Amino acid sequence: MATGISPLIHERRLKVGGRSIQIVLILFGALTAGCGHKSKSVSDLCSDLRALSSWTEQVDLFIGYIEDEKATNDYALGHVRYIDSEVKEAFKDLEEATAEPQLDPLLRECRQHYSFLIEQVGRLQLNLKNPSVLDDIKNEIQRIHAASERTRAIL
Amino acid sequence: MKKLLGVTLGIMTALGGFVDFGQIIFTMQAGALFRYRLLWAIVLGTVAIITYMEMCGRVAVVAQKTVFVVVRERLGRRFGLVVLIASNLLNLITCAAELGGIAIVLHLLTGWPEKVVLIASVPVLWCTISALQFEWIERLFGLAGLTMVVFAISAAQLHPDWAAIVGGVVPRLTSGKPGEGILYWYFAVGIFSAMLMEYEVHFYSSGAIEEDWKPQDLSENFSVAAFGSILGAFLTVALLALGAIIFSPRGIFPELLSTTIMAGALPFGKGGLLLALGGTLACLGGAAVETTLSGAYNYCQFYNLSWGKNLPAKKVPVFTKSWSAMLGIAMLVDLTGVGPLQLVNISIVFGMVVMPFTYYPILRVAMDKKIMGRHLNGRGDTALGIAVLGLIILAAIAAIPLMIVTNFGKP
């Protein structure tokens, strides 16, 4: 199936290839652009609080799963580290974000909820095999969940 | 027995396409947000991929033309090259996402650092592809991927709402949730796109040539395409159901592969968890191999260079270097720290935009009596092909605006 290529055809192919690569890269760049930070709107904050509720529920579900002794050690530790990393990333995003003056107290509240969650996920990492601490973390997580729902209701 | 094992091409193609990193998370997110309301998109995607997988298999067997030969001939060399670059960029992004997913699963299995298992897994994949003939690659990943059935068993054990499942087959224009109509359509387009990812047809048509199918094997072509796709769709429905049963009532929006794996093992003990991890690993491995090889197939076929997994590496040097490079570059992309989920989101939307330029040439050739002779499309095939292509074009137009408005499907 192989064919011989003359230098002229090869040069032309390279030219056409170069232009084609440019077109594709421009399209690709356009697709991935626009991911920078911005001022938080009401819907952004709603979305952040919804994500927070989702994380608290995930942690709650996960604690139930490890309490039932269904998780292997490596899985449990790996999973909680992934949660920790994601929540910290969301918190970092919130720390860098700004909001209009009337939304600023709610942004600060949102940051505070995330910070409490990070604290509990950190405790969880250290106490995966400690049932009494797990129960306490579960209660704290439920409190954070309720508080974030209250903040969301204000929005 | 050989004929029975031949179905593994369809299984690997479909599992690698339907149940890859993106689809596992994306489908569970759709189930979590809209319960069974997007099941119709899976049904539509299944019909569409069977239609085009069968068509490109038939074109490959009868005309001995694989997808990128058809693309070059029908779209011209210049525009064909744009499609080639876009498709291979897509293959590369998807491959990087799958490798990232493999590293996550291996980390969850062993506890070893993610980057260490990533660097270790790539030579293992390279050796597997190098050492095995095409048939054995498809058998290994196709059959190992069947362990994903644990997700379906898990869904069945958790008592899904069967009436809602049946109701979900009927397409709905609205999500049923106020203010989430655009998000609903983002997920509908995403599910449809993920089921039609181009690398599935690149791999399938090349596989038909690798396996030396003859026109007398064409009846099997349909069963292989249909069986593999229906199995993939069945598992995709199971993922959607798990999202609906476990995550929807709790308001969880699953963003982690480890969360979705837990859903697949929730009713079982540690054995179930290991099976879910193993099944996911097999599917991600299959998808990584599929995208790696597809990149090399596409390049060699477009430039009419020698290719073939069953030929000695010395006889197909460009092909061998191409797939090795795909694997290596994909690993480097992961090592830069880009998250696999971010890569998947880009590949699903980007894939939708490129899709019409892959499927349109296949349809044209399959309708061409001069090329296909008595094996050309029947009226039904052509009507279905045109209808599916129309949907693909609509979805391609909508993909980017939906992505921007929903911020990559963030609720």
Image (cartoon, coloured by chain):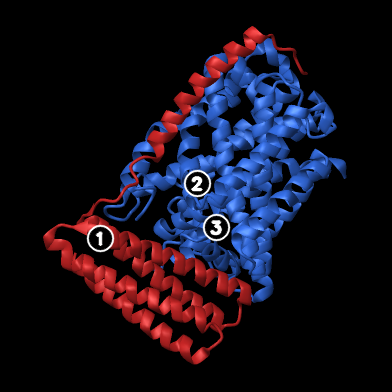
Chain colours: A red, B blue
Is B317 situated left or right of B281 in this image?
Answer: right
Q: CA distance from mark 3 to mark 1?
A: 29 Å
Left or right: B238 in relation to B296: left
Callout 3 crowding tier (Cα within 10 Å): few <14, some 14–19, many ≥20 = many
User: Judging from the image, what secondary structure is the residue with disc 2 in?
Assistant: helix
Mark 1 Cα-neighbour bin, 10 Å: few <14, some 14–19, many ≥20: many
x and y, in percent, of residue A82 in the image:
50, 66
The residue labelled by disc 2 is: B343
The answer as to whether the residues below labels 3 and 2 share one chain is yes
Which amino acid lies under the numbered mark 1 shown in the image of this protein? Leu
The numbered mark 3 sits on a residue in which chain?
B
Q: Quadrant of the N terminus of chain B?
A: top right
Q: Residue at x 59, y 15 (%)?
A: A13
Disc on res. A45: 1
Q: Where's the C terminus of chain B, which quadrant?
A: bottom left
Q: Residue B385, relative to residue A35: is it above or below?
A: above
Residue most extreme to the right? B1
Element type at mark 3: helix
**Pointers 1 and 2 in contact (C-beta within 8 Å):** no
Disc 1 chain ID: A
- Tag 3: residue type? Leu
Q: Quadrant of residue A1?
A: top right
Q: Position of residue B358 (x, y in %)?
A: 56, 27
Disc 3 marks which residue?
B239
What SS does tag 1 mark?
helix
Separation of marks 3 and 2 at Cα, in angstroms: 20 Å
